[in-house]
Image (cartoon, rainbow, N blue to C red):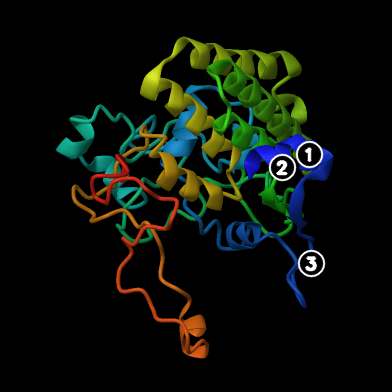
């Protein structure tokens, strides 16, 4: 079990041991760039929508990783700190529905400071916003470091796609150990260790963008203040608030390789601070996914699932839609 692995002290415990896939910079034959870089750094602009929830979470808490995760093409967002724009961000003209306002959620359509993304469940189509929406940054996709230059994206910029696919990082293991910790004090210790390792790793990616103004990087004092603040908030909190602080930091750390966040959410229901689905009643949260169709066709012993609500053996929580709380 988990404790036996820890007792043997033979696991990923340092950033040098991180299990990750390294991408390259070749554009053709083969294209070895990070897939998110290839999608966002094109002559026609960015094509991925970043999560409004995570961008706002990092912005309001002054997370030192935000300039590495995201590259802003503009300095303001319609409906937040720029006038609403029906053409490029139609929802900036809309009033949030009652299930948002009743839940106390403040981010519906727009995150300020040019963090231009989308909220969960928004299916309003694709407006001409490829040169205004926020693109992936230098971590982990090998894009641009956000030095507040507010230029547009394009081929070969930043790290030219030489990013990574994080699979199991030492920082993830610290969060796993925190999740399994026997006391809140131990959990706080592992939370701190995970943040220290991950922020150090993320900051190392700044050098991939040779043309960036790295004077915008957070310094050591700012990083320390951020981590100390998270730990202080964690130690002062209790119940759901404490679990949410831990889970929010885990999810932010998982950015770019976040399959584990889906598992953690099914297992714990945290963070419960996620903004709700765009729709009032989007249906049950998927507890499993369908098998790949090719696998169903080629494997005579496999039958396709008939729904997405079947729970795996370790998911002993109530059935959807009762669980998880945010959907």
Label 3 to label 2: alpha-carbon separation = 39 Å
**Left or right: 101, with 269 as reference point:** left
Cα separation, mark 1 vs mark 2, equals 5 Å
Quadrant where the N terminus sits is: top right
Please tell me how many numbered marks the rendered image carries: 3
Residue 8: mark in rendering:
1
Q: Estimate the x, y position of residue 247 in percent, counting from the top left.
A: 49, 33
Mark 3 in CB contact with mark 1 (< 8 angstroms): no
53 or 45, which is in the foreground?
53
In the image, is residue 1 above or below residue 112? Answer: below
| Residue 184 image position (x, y, % from top left) | 53, 18
Q: Are marks 1 and 2 in contact (CB under 8 Å)?
A: yes
Q: CA distance from mark 3 to mark 1?
A: 41 Å
Q: Could you say which disc has been placed on residue 26 in the image?
A: 3
> Mark 3 falls on what kind of element?
loop
Residue located at (29% from left, 49% from top): 90
Q: Secondary structure at mark 2?
A: helix
Q: Which residue is mark 2?
A: 5
Image quadrant where residue 139 sits: top right
Q: Secondary structure at mark 1?
A: helix
Of callouts 3 and 2, the N-terminal one: 2
Earlier in the chain: of badge 3 and badge 1, it is 1
Does the residue at mark 3 contact the one at mark 2 (Cβ under 8 Å)?
no
| Residue 216 horizontal side relative to residue 107, left or right | right
Residue placed most toward the observer, 148 or 123: 123
Q: Which sits in the foreground, 300 or 230?
A: 300
């Amino acid at each position: 079990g988990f404790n036996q692995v820890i007792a043997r002290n033979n696991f990923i415990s340092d950033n040098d041991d991180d299990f990750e896939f390294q991408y390259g910079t070749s554009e053709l034959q083969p294209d070895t760039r990070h897939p998110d870089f290839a999608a966002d750094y094109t002559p026609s602009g960015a094509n991925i929508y970043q999560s409004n929830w995570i961008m706002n979470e990092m912005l309001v808490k002054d997370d030192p990783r935000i300039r590495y995760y995201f590259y802003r093409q503009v300095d303001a967002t319609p409906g937040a700190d720029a006038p609403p724009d029906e053409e490029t961000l139609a929802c900036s003209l809309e009033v949030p529905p009652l299930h948002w306002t009743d839940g106390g959620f403040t981010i519906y359509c727009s995150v300020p400071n040019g963090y231009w993304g989308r909220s969960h469940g928004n299916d309003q189509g694709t407006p001409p916003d490829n040169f205004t929406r926020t693109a992936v940054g230098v971590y982990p996709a090998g894009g641009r470091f956000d030095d507040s230059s507010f230029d547009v994206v394009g081929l070969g910029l930043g790290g030219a796609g030489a990013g990574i696919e994080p699979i199991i990082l030492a920082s993830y293991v610290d969060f796993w150990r925190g999740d399994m910790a026997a006391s809140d004090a131990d959990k706080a210790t592992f939370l701190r260790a995970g943040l220290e390792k991950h922020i150090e790793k993320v900051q190392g990616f700044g050098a991939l963008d040779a043309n960036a103004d790295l004077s915008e990087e957070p310094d050591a004092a700012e990083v320390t203040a951020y981590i100390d603040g998270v730990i202080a908030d964690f130690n002062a909190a209790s119940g759901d608030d404490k679990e949410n602080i831990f889970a929010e930091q885990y999810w932010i750390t998982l950015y770019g390789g976040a399959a584990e966040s889906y598992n953690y959410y099914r297992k714990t229901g945290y963070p419960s601070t996620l903004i709700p689905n765009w729709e009032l009643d989007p249906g049950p949260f998927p507890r499993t996914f369908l098998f790949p169709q090719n696998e169903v066709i080629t494997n005579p012993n496999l039958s396709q699932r008939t729904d997405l609500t079947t729970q795996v053996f370790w998911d002993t929580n109530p059935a959807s839609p009762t669980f998880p709380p945010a959907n």
